Image: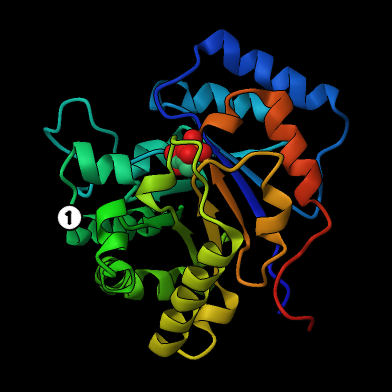
Amino acid sequence: MKRTPIVAGNWKMNLLGSDVVAYAEALAAAGPPETDVDIVLFPTPVYLAAAARAMLEWASVGAQDVHAEEKGAYTGDVAAAQARDAGAAWALAGHSERRQYHGESNVEVARKAERTLGVGLTPVVCVGETLEQRQQGETEAILDAQLAPVLAVLDAADGDTEGGAVLAYEPVWAIGTGLSASPEIAAAVHSHLRRALNDYRSGLGDAARILYGGSVNADNCVDLLGRPDIDGFLIGGASLDPASFLRIIRLCAGSGSGPAP
Ligand code: PEP
């Protein structure tokens, strides 16, 4: 099964409205979009609608986070249905910065992913260990614990959503540090995650796209994507500049991953 690579940019709390427009213009000026890569951008929520309008056929957009509840008195939060209404097609769930700064538990992440799926968005579920957990030899146990409550959601996403089941392995020690996981480390974890998905339901792992995130740039993306279980990237810092994001997209184009049909 061939899996179309995803190259996704997480802008976090960066860029202004004028930057979003300039970014879209830079992508458009680069020519027609790559057709064999799914390109996704995660702007801050206030610019979601503007980004969805501006990116046109170049990229789809997603929410960086949605609330686990359908709607209500949750000042400052965004409902999944609102994100969809604003033009999102995807939503991150469980980014490590949400887990770390907002205390999101594995169960809450799963509830958010479920809510995302419920309104027709494709959840991108993020998992990853801290440096201390890796040094203690706990990586697989931590990932398994993060994965357990979302397995049913990923299973439902496979088939129910346009994006299918999408998981992002983002070692916390590699995010924003300039210290990317080596292709060997990333490949070993991705293979573990794919096996866990296949153990849950045969074929789920083969279909799922598992992204790597953590200091990805134009210099390391080719080696990482060359590994059979790495299906693309979730990129923070290097996605803020359209030229650097485009370089990564171009390098990833034409490299559909997974065993040949
Ligand atoms: C991220 O925030 O998801 C991320 C991977 O950031 P960076 O690429 O900057 O490490």
Picture coordinates of residue 212 (x, y %)?
53, 55
Give the residue at x 33% y 75%. Answer: 152
**In the visual, does 182 lie left or right of 189?**
right
Report the residue that reaches farthest toward the front.
Answer: 135
Report the residue that reaches farthest toward the right.
Answer: 31
How many numbered dots are placed on residues in this image? 1
Give the residue at x 52% y 47%. Answer: 180
Residue 184 visible somewhere in the drawing: yes
In which quadrant will I find the N terminus?
bottom right
Q: Is residue 68 above or below residue 117?
A: above
Picture coordinates of residue 261 (x, y %)?
78, 84
Quarter assignment of residue 203: bottom right
**In the visual, does 114 lie left or right of 69?**
right
User: Coloured how?
Assistant: rainbow
Mark 1 lies on residue:
105
The verdict on label 1 being within 8 Å of ligand 1 is no
Secondary structure of the residue carrying numbered label 1: loop
Residue 56 visible somewhere in the drawing: no
Report the residue that reaches farthest toward the left.
Answer: 73
Q: Is residue 139 above or below residue 80?
A: below
Picture coordinates of residue 221 (x, y %)?
68, 49
Give the residue at x 60% y 61%. Answer: 183
Crowding around mark 1 (Cα neighbors within 10 Å: few <14, some 14 to 19, many 20+) is some
Q: Is residue 222 above or below residue 42?
A: below
Give the residue at x 64% y 23%. Answer: 241
Q: Is residue 94 above or below residue 10?
A: below
Viewer-closest of 248 and 149: 248
Picture coordinates of residue 44 (x, y %)?
42, 26
**In the visual, does 17 lie left or right of 34?**
left
> Tag 1: residue type?
Ser
